[in-house]
Image (cartoon, rainbow, N blue to C red):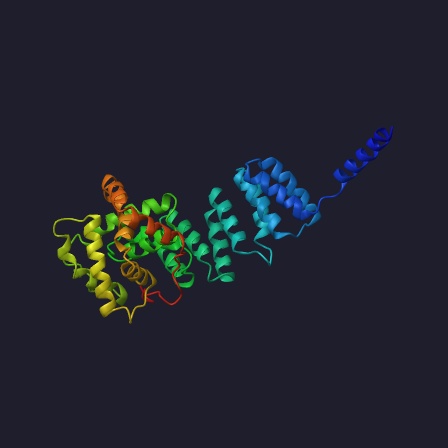
Amino acid sequence: MKRLILLPFALLITLASIAQPEDPKSLHETAKTFMRTGDFDNAILVFNRALQLDPKNLEIQKDLVMTYYLKRDYVKALEGVEVLVERDDADVVTYQIAGNVYKALEEVKDAEKMYKKALKKYPRSGPLYSEYGELLWAKKDYSAIEFWEKGIEVDPAYSGNYYNASSYYFFTKDKAWSLIYGEIFINMESLGERGAAMKQLLLQGYKEKLFLDPDLMKGEEKNKSEFAKAYLRAMNKQSSLVNKGISTEVLTMVRTRFILDWFATNASKFPFKLFDYHRQLLQEGMFDAYNQWLFGASDNLAAYDNWTKTHTQEYEAFNTFQRSRVFRMPPGQYYQPKER
């Protein structure tokens, strides 16, 4: 009898708990779960209910617009973006979302206007310089490189501008920056398709650009970057090492001698994190493994696989070391000329 009496009370408690109004924070989390699993309709439904409770919440508004974008409902996404970018508290991510929506709708002029506004507000944002440059590059406006370079200068810890600038320089007559920026990018973002593609591009750069002419200084008379000229002079001293072709092993020798020469002649004038890292790897006996990681698979996959099996300790030691560190370029090591 007591059990029968208790059942209605238990049911009332359950119903009461269901009827309790949700707070916007928990609704936001629920909606993000739907968003992550691709259930965009449910995500939108719950985001809207969260906004009813907290209509000025920037994070909820951004996620709602991003969900419309992912759903490819660009009309609704645009409506949300136009509200977002007018907010005084619009942050970098807000403008990135807006850029994605404008690009999807091919609204290039609106996108340019938005990026200019965003960069006035956030003049040291690497992601905004990177994405604005990509917009310009897509319409064959080669001033894109100026934005990628500015992004590297003001936000050197952001990887995207190195990728874009390296890719750009690979298709120009420049011999140095495609290699330098490309290797920096790989160290900052080695995983994924872009990292693998950049490794291939880096190997091609040594073969097709840097050492194509036996005299690396040929045609460099008008190069305004003293750092780039110092780099090329130091590499020029190693040119004879590639007389019989370029391989991972040859590049390891070239780059080892380059680092020794660089620290004897240029390091005090041009401190540079990438070259500091090379010297550290040399001192710790891991530079060979690093170069195998960098070039081996692109150069000769079978030989690289064999190297990893015959140098197990070196390979594992380098991998352990690499996983334990985060590579970031510091401020103050930007060596492009002011007028290019």
Left or right for 10, reference 77: right
Residue 42 lies, with reference to residue 138, above or below; the image says: above
Which quadrant would residue 149 be assigned to in this image?
bottom left
Total numbered circles = 0
The residue sitting at 47% across, 50% down in the picture is 109
At 32% across and 50% down in the image, what residue appears? 167
- Residue 153 placement: quadrant: bottom left
x and y, in percent, of residue 150 in the image: 39, 61
Closest to the observer, 308 or 137: 308
Question: Which is more toward the observer, 333 or 278?
Answer: 278
Question: Could you tell me residue 283's position as x and y percent?
Answer: 28, 61
Q: In x, y percent, where is residue 247?
A: 19, 48
Relative to 91, does residue 20 appear above or below in the rendering? above
Any part of residue 210 in sight: no
User: Residue at horizontal 80%, vertical 35%?
Assistant: 10
Q: Is 219 positioned to the left or the right of 89 in the image?
A: left
Asked whether the viewer can see residue 316, the reply is yes
Quarter occupied by the N terminus: top right
User: Residue placed farthest to the bottom in the image?
Assistant: 268
Between 157 and 108, the residue placed more toward the observer is 157
Quarter where residue 321 is shown = bottom left
**Residue 316 drawn at (x, y percent):** 33, 48
Q: Which quarter of the rendering shows the C terminus? A: bottom left
| Position of residue 40 in the picture relative to residue 334 (left or right) | right
From what the image shows, is residue 254 above or below residue 307? Answer: below
